[in-house]
Image (cartoon, rainbow, N blue to C red):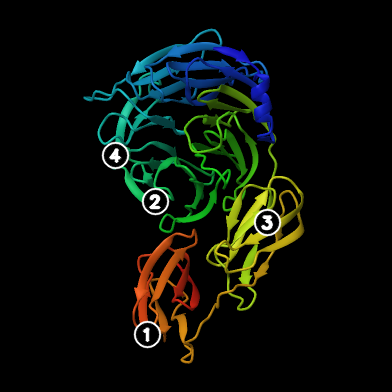
Amino acid sequence: MKSSTLLFCLFALTLSAQHNIEFRSNIQYPRILSNLWGYTDTANGKEYALVGEETGMSIVDVSNPDNPFQVFFVPNDTSMWQEPKTWSHYAYMTNERGGGLLIVDLSNLPASVNYTHWSGIPDEDYQTTHTCFIDENGIIYLNGSNLFHRGVMMCDLKPDPMNPVFLGIFDDFYVHDCFARNDTLYASEIINGTIAIVDVSDKSAPVVLARQQTPFNFSHNVWPTDDNKYLFNTDEKKFAPVTVYDISDLNNIREVEQYRHSDVDSSIPHNTYYRDGYLYTSYYRDGVTICDAHRPDNLVEIGSYDTSPFPSFGGFEGCWGVYPFFPSGNIICSDRQEGLFVLTPTLKRACYLEGNVTDAISGSNLNGITVEIIGNNRLKKTDLFGNYKTGVADSGSYDIRFTDYSVFCNTVIVSDVQLKEAQTTTVNVQMFCSFPSNLSDDTDTEFSLTTTKPVFTDKTQLLLKNHSENTASLSVYNLSGALVKELDINTTFAQIEIGDSWSAGTYFVRADNQTNHSFLRLIKLN
């Protein structure tokens, strides 16, 4: 292991990829890192990084963020997955190779540590666990073990922190990671593509309260707000967002936001954690990002630091974990190849921009219009009702561009919009669109495409008149430009029912024969 500040070339590379996060120091390791966690000694205020290295736990004193140093290394079975958590003055670390659960007593730091490997599940050969979480009551949740269906095993640490007591298991599906508070478990069922919200007040008989499918069907980790009203989720996939759900009503869970560090590359979010109104995400090749999450339905990135020299495209190199819970406010990150980073963020409130986009002729709301604060690499789109929410980190004057990439509506640029910290600026826009918003059946028209319900919930009927000898074709595209449906029409009048199995969103329909074209814009609601 080598302790130093970054080499000049690496520092120069990351300097242009940092915003409101200051580099303090870096410790490099001879082997790859996985996740990390933090421990604060309440007796003397010292802060320690607990770093999951391929062969064990590296305990690093980061009290002086400019001069961190390793105080102990605790061996564990060799594994590329080492996932630590803490409770009281104990650290617990899982791995995917064997030996059960590593338990480390940190109470004698910096003089010494005591540790053991525990595998005491009654009548079972417990060896491996993927991740773990420990709640406020000293219950450890062991996720993705080698036992049962690899769900969540729950054990009590309070009687003897070095010898947990098995309580029960939630085992519907494989669980990759979880969060628990107030006897409610939020489980990332990554292979099933769902988040399970579970009542675990009786650990021997968990009860599923709700289950939510995630956008990329690959829930990797979850973390709720302190009031348990919103839940943040990462899908560990290229182009996947950090998704926010309103979970205040478990009978009506609503997706309210999707955040991406960039809309122009395929980088992958990994782990996300919430603290005091801010969301910290380890973003593999893009390092670490911080969002103002005071308004969970409008996450605005206010800080970033790129720990990785790899380009910002899909790949699993780079930042695995971030720990933002030190009293000092410093954060630590584990980059798989580049080691441990100690960073100091400058937290600030975002500048918010929101509004509504409508058709200038009909006044109808325009869904799927791209909203871009020029100079910012994050794009937002209007929702089914034409509304949008976005923002930037820094106050100033900005130009805002509204674009319809289907090329049905003109591009609009609103100049010199003043955005201010912790304030919301409203900009409403009208766009002129080349397609008719409300077509009627005109019997004199030789070639026309009309609909009975331009806004529908189950299905709608299209009426195509083609008083021509030419065969007509019909093509339906979703908002991303993907072809949803295509067919040939050989009659002079056709009635076509579409949309029954479609997801909610905006669709564009084009009818053609050799000499004529007709367009429709449809909106399907939930």
Identify residue type, mark 4. Asp
* Residue at x-position 52% and y-position 29%: 318
Q: Please say if 300 is above or below 408.
A: above
- Check disc 3 and report its element: helix, strand or loop: strand
Chain-order first, disc 1 or disc 2: 2
Label 3 – label 1 distance at C-alpha:
49 Å
Chain-order first, disc 2 or disc 4: 4
Residue at which label 4 appears = 171
Chain-order first, disc 4 or disc 1: 4
- Few, some or many residues within 10 Å of mark 1 (<14, 14–19, 20+): some
Q: Please say if 493 is above or below 302.
A: below
Identify residue type, mark 1. Thr
Residue at which label 2 appears = 213
Label 3 – label 2 distance at C-alpha:
29 Å
Pick the quarter of the image with the N terminus: top right
Residue at which label 1 appears = 492
- Check disc 1 and report its element: helix, strand or loop: loop
Identify residue type, mark 3. Leu
Indicate the position of residue 350 as horizontal and vertical percent values: 68, 47
Label of residue 353 in the image: 3
